[in-house]
Image (tube, rainbow, N blue to C red):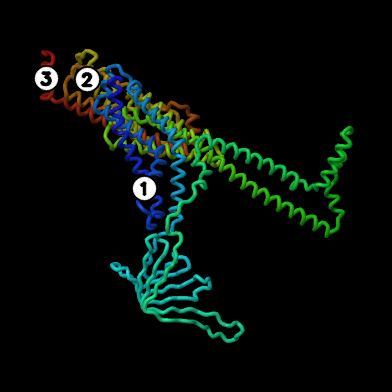
């Protein structure tokens, strides 16, 4: 193995192991947070909770692997880019694909292992976890009696206390209703105090009561007209009740009850289940069609159908005659209906309505049944494809994380965590959308389940290409520059635009008066353009100038003169002076295309009429005029400052001395 491969694999495996454990822990905490209400207060031992966490952690492994690979690959290549290791490798002629090759091999093995894990281990762990979670849900919590409230958690008893000592657990003012005879509140026990505890095996509850009374209502003779309400009561100093508890111990359910669930099946079992469901669905569909045609649309009796079949067999030679016997001639139903009496018409209409209601009920019930079976089939198809998509996602996230790290060139935990979380959220949302589309039969199982993987694969290929070509796709300054230019606050200056002239041509000897005259002419034309723009900024004039096709001669003259003057200053000896360079750097770039019309008058009129395109275009044109006004003001001020310098004899003398020193050098 080459040293490069060892370096990349070693840099990847460390973060991957740490991040995988961290992600698995976070997902496990999310599982606990989801089921915390069903686990707390049921007296579960550490063994049961540990077993449940172990099975749930195993079921979360295929979900934690893609996120771990994404984050660790991004961190690995981000660290290599931050410490210029990628730059050194690329300068040595090593491409990004060659650097990624060892990780591709490692992640490919991880993906294959994840597939076999999802196919062989996950059905077993899901079965264990679901059955154990079901048993935990069915287990009743420990007895927790709050003062002032009735507690009915013990079968056939309702217990209420008014006070409880937190240190000794002595109960005060105890009231117990006995419902074991199923006759209502006919037996009640009142006690001054008591104590309650469960046996070691949690099968019996022992309640010791002190200083109380036991009231029991007796059955009276129903033949008596006057009710006497007979009852029996006796006082006691100490009484002990032993109540048998049911449902308080964890009872394990037979796991065979859950084996038919689609999450507990491997690929072969899912395939068999899908074939059975498709056959059943097809059979139900055909049965529905036959029943609807024979029993609902055409109410034919069996005897009539049998007689028709007998006639068809006897007269096979004469097909036309058979058809005439089976299918009678067309008759006018309205005329036949009008010949009936009113009672017959009412009876026929009621019978028809009854048949229609019955058919509608049958159609609705069958539609619901077919919809349920189809949804059940879709769940099996989703689970079948999920075993492939989660494994394939590991490889896809490598081609996203590694190029992103090479582009961002930021290692550590912060930036990779943020980007990995965002990308995984996008993948998770797309996966949920695909599954929802499959369940709703909007897409088939292949399209819905592979949709997120194909989209991320395209993104990964694009990022890999951009990282190979050292693109600045994630450079913040690139996007900030675009928005600054769009909003008119960009920092691009004429000196940046004219960088092809600086230092590439010999400096020319231009007289100071000639250069001053050119700047003065530029200032005058800029002033005229500014006056025109200020006139067009008014709302009425803005609309007119937009719709009306015209050419601004002052603006055209300024565009020509502006470029010539800047070129003249840059190629003159005066540009050697740092002061002149600073002033030239203050001249802004002016986009004349945004204020000159390149579209025809008719087309602009159509855009203006169409709402809201017209308002958008007018607003854009108005902002362009404001931007042009501000930049013309800057041109006038900078030109005036250079002219003032040229009119100052003392400064000119210093400039000439500085220029002579340049000539000596």
Q: Residue 463 at what x, y percent from top left?
A: 38, 27
Viewer-nearest residue: 127 or 568: 127
Residue visible at 57% across and 87% down?
A: 226
Viewer-nearest residue: 355 or 334: 355
Q: CA distance from mark 1 to mark 3?
A: 84 Å
Q: CA distance from mark 2 to mark 3?
A: 18 Å
Q: What is the crowding at mark 1: few (fewer than 14 residues within 10 Å), some, or many (at least 20)? A: few
Q: How many marks?
A: 3
Q: Is residue 203 left or right of residue 335?
A: left
Helix, strand or loop under label 1? helix
Helix, strand or loop under label 3? helix
Residue that label 3 marks: 658
- Residue 107: assigned label: none
Eyeballing the image, is 598 above or below 216?
above
- Residue 50: assigned label: 1
Helix, strand or loop under label 2? helix
| Residue 524 appears in view | yes
Q: Quadrant of the N terminus?
A: top left
- Residue 515: assigned label: 2
Residue visible at 75% across and 45% down?
A: 294
In which image quadrant can residue 529 be found?
top left
Residue visible at 56% across and 43% down?
A: 376
Instruction: Name which of mark 1 and mark 3 comes first in the sequence.
Output: 1
């Amino acid at each position: 193995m080459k040293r490069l491969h060892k370096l990349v694999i070693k840099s990847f495996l460390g973060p991957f192991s740490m991040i995988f454990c961290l992600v698995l822990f976070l997902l496990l905490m999310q599982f606990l947070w989801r089921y915390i209400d069903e686990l707390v207060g049921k007296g579960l031992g550490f063994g049961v909770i540990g077993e449940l966490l172990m099975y749930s952690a195993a079921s979360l492994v295929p979900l934690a692997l893609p996120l771990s690979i994404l984050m660790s690959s991004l961190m690995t290549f981000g660290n290599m880019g931050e410490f210029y290791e990628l730059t050194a490798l690329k300068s040595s002629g090593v491409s990004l694909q060659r650097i990624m090759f060892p990780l591709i091999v490692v992640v490919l093995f991880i993906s294959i292992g994840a597939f076999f894990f999802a196919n062989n281990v996950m059905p077993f762990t899901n079965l264990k976890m679901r059955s154990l979670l079901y048993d935990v849900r069915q287990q009743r919590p420990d007895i927790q009696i709050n003062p002032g409230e009735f507690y009915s958690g013990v079968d056939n008893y309702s217990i209420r206390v008014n006070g409880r000592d937190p240190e000794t657990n002595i109960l005060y003012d105890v009231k117990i209703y006995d419902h074991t005879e199923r006759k209502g509140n006919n037996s009640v026990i009142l006690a001054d105090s008591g104590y309650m505890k469960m046996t070691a095996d949690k099968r019996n509850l022992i309640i010791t009561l002190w200083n109380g009374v036991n009231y029991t209502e007796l059955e009276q003779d129903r033949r008596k007209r006057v009710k006497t309400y007979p009852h029996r009561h006796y006082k006691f100093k100490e009484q002990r009740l032993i109540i048998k508890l049911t449902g308080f111990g964890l009872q394990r359910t037979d796991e065979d009850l859950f084996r038919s669930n689609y999450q507990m099946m491997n690929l072969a079992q899912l395939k068999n289940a899908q074939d059975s469901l498709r056959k059943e669905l097809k059979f139900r569909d055909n049965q529905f069609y036959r029943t609807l045609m024979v029993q609902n649309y055409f109410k034919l009796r069996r005897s009539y159908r049998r007689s028709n079949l007998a006639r068809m067999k006897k007269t096979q030679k004469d097909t036309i005659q058979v058809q005439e016997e089976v299918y009678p001639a067309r008759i006018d139903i309205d005329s036949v209906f009008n010949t009936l009496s009113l009672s017959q018409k009412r009876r026929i209409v009621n019978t028809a309505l009854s048949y229609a209601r019955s058919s509608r009920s049958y159609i609705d019930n069958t539609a619901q049944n077919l919809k349920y079976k189809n949804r059940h089939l879709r769940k099996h198809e989703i689970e079948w494809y999920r075993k492939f998509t989660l494994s394939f996602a590991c490889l896809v996230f490598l081609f996203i994380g590694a190029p992103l790290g090479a582009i961002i060139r930021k290692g550590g935990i912060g930036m990779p965590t943020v980007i990995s979380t965002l990308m995984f959220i996008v993948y998770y949302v797309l996966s949920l959308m695909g599954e929802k589309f499959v369940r709703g039969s909007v897409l088939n199982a292949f399209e819905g389940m592979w949709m997120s993987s194909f989209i991320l694969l395209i993104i990964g290929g694009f990022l890999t290409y951009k990282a190979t070509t050292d693109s600045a796709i994630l450079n913040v300054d690139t996007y900030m520059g675009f928005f600054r230019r769009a909003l008119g606050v960009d920092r691009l200056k004429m000196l940046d635009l004219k960088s092809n002239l600086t230092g590439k041509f010999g400096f020319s000897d231009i007289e100071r008066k000639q250069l001053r005259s050119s700047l003065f002419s530029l200032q005058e034309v800029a002033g005229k353009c500014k006056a025109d723009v200020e006139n067009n900024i008014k709302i009425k004039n803005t609309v007119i100038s937009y719709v009306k096709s015209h050419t601004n001669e002052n603006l055209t003259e300024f565009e020509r003169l502006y470029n010539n003057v800047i070129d003249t200053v840059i190629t003159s000896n005066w540009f050697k002076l740092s002061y002149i360079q600073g002033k030239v750097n203050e001249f802004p770039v002016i986009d004349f295309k945004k204020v000159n019309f390149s579209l025809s008058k008719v087309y602009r009129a159509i855009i203006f009429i169409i709402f809201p395109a017209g308002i958008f275009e007018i607003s854009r044109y108005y902002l362009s005029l404001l931007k042009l006004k501000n930049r013309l003001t800057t041109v006038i001020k900078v030109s005036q400052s250079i002219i003032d310098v040229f009119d100052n004899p003392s400064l000119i003398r210093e400039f000439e001395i500085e220029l002579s020193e340049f000539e000596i050098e």
